[in-house]
Amino acid sequence: MSKKRKRIIAVAGTGYVGLANSVLLSQHNKVLAVDIVEEKVKMINERKSPIVDKEISDYLENHDLDLTATLDGESAYKQAEFVIIATPTNYNVEKNFFDTSSVEAVIKLVMKVNPNVPIIIKSTVPVGYTESVRKKFKNNNIIFSPEFLREGKALYDNLYPSRIIVGVPEDNLRLKEVANDFVNLLKQGAIKEDIPVLIIKPTEAEAVKLFANTYLALRVSYFNELDTYAQVKGLNAAQIIEGMCLDPRIGTHYNNPSFGYGGYCLPKDTKQLLANFNGVPENVIEAIVKSNDTRKDFIADTIAKKLSTLPKEKQVAGIFRLTMKANSDNFRESSIQGVMKRLADKGIDIVVYEPTLAVDEYDGYKIIADLDEFKKVSSVIIANRIDNDLDDVLEKVYSRDIYQEN
């Protein structure tokens, strides 16, 4: 690609999505990464990653990036030729909807200082949201571009994207030009060539995101239920999975049992999609949401049964890592926490080994910082994902990690 002038791009939010996009785009453009957390801003400017992602850490330390993090959103948005919104949209259980207040706060500030700049929403939002904020704010410059990143591989999935999708109103030629301009910026930073690109309507783009993640949750749930069946019936789950997945229509991917799906996206996206189905006939989407709780109930019951054979004072469950996946620092909605809470409700003592926490307790559970002490105290060690650190106590470990991969 021929050398082009640097564009000034502001990115609101420096989580997995925001930081990965900031690093990607700052290879060839000037990026101003906006956050409200001073420590994160400081780390990025010192070329340290505030999230666990080896590739992001490497790029920050070893690549010439035109990237500046700032707390001053007003100044960043005022200079920008594009504003990307990648702020968190946590699922609000009471409202049965994503909390999109952080997205709207950015839109308001951008409109105040730079009303004509294109705004690209990358935060996950409900189906129909982009059209609603375009009307609410009377802003014809807002488009949507879903993100398809994995925890621990956020930058990799931008450097080698499966696809780039941008949602724009189909009758707006100006915004389609903006969308193509934005696509070219993403492709400019990517390593992969011949990336599939879809320019579709915003509401359809929002639906792609939620349906894609719900399908992934379905696949996780399916193999987890297969594993539950195998455990109850005394069968070898690995042999069943191997025989199934040799069918090329099924494939040998995303088939490793776990304690349930979790993390930043799948729990909230499945619930949001189910909420969007209000008034629409469905059976499968609701079942996907329910099956995740059923799996955690089964795992907790199985562990409790193992511990029930021991004297009460020996019934100690050790939780090995609170993170959802290996090479991740995310505790949010991790399935092992759901198992942990169910065990605690059964009156079982819980201790936790989580080296990223420099505290004595987490959510009321005792943290043991010394791994050897943790192993000694725990009668059963519960690990969503197996680690070499557990090789010497495998007889104590309960895990459904057949293939030792995320």
Image: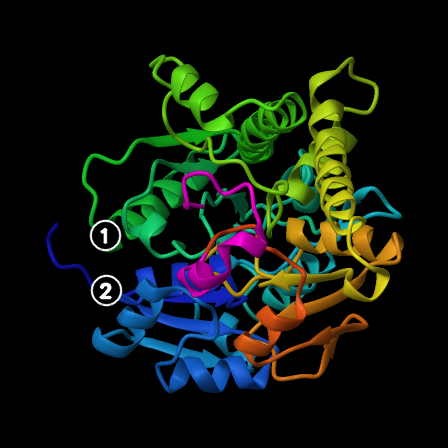
Q: Would you say residue 389 sits in the magenta stretch?
A: yes
Characterize the local packing of mark 1: few (<14), some (14-19) or many (20 or more) Cα atoms within 10 angstroms.
many
Instruction: Residue 12: give x, y in percent of width and height.
Output: 53, 66
Is residue 399 inside the magenta stretch? Answer: yes
In the rendered image, the vertical position of residue 380 relative to residue 182, given as above or below: below
Q: What element carries label 2?
A: loop
Tell which of 306 and 23 is nearer to you.
306
- The colour scheme applied to this rendered structure is rainbow
Pointer 1 residue: 188
Q: Report helix, strand or loop for mark 1.
A: helix
Q: Give the range drawn in magenta.
A: 387-406
Residue 9 drawn at (x, y percent): 40, 65
Quadrant for residue 220, please give it: top right
**Whole-percent x and y of residue 145?**
48, 43
Q: Which amino acid type corresponds to the residue marked 1 in the rendered image?
A: Gln
Query: In the displayed structure, would residue 41 be above or below residue 230?
Result: below
Front-most of 72 and 214? 214
- Give the residue type at disc 2: His
Instruction: Give the number of the disc on residue 28.
Output: 2
Residue in the foreground of this view, choosing between 25 and 308: 308
* Among the 4 quarters of the image, the one containing residue 104: bottom right
For the point 31% across and 74% down, which residue is it? 60
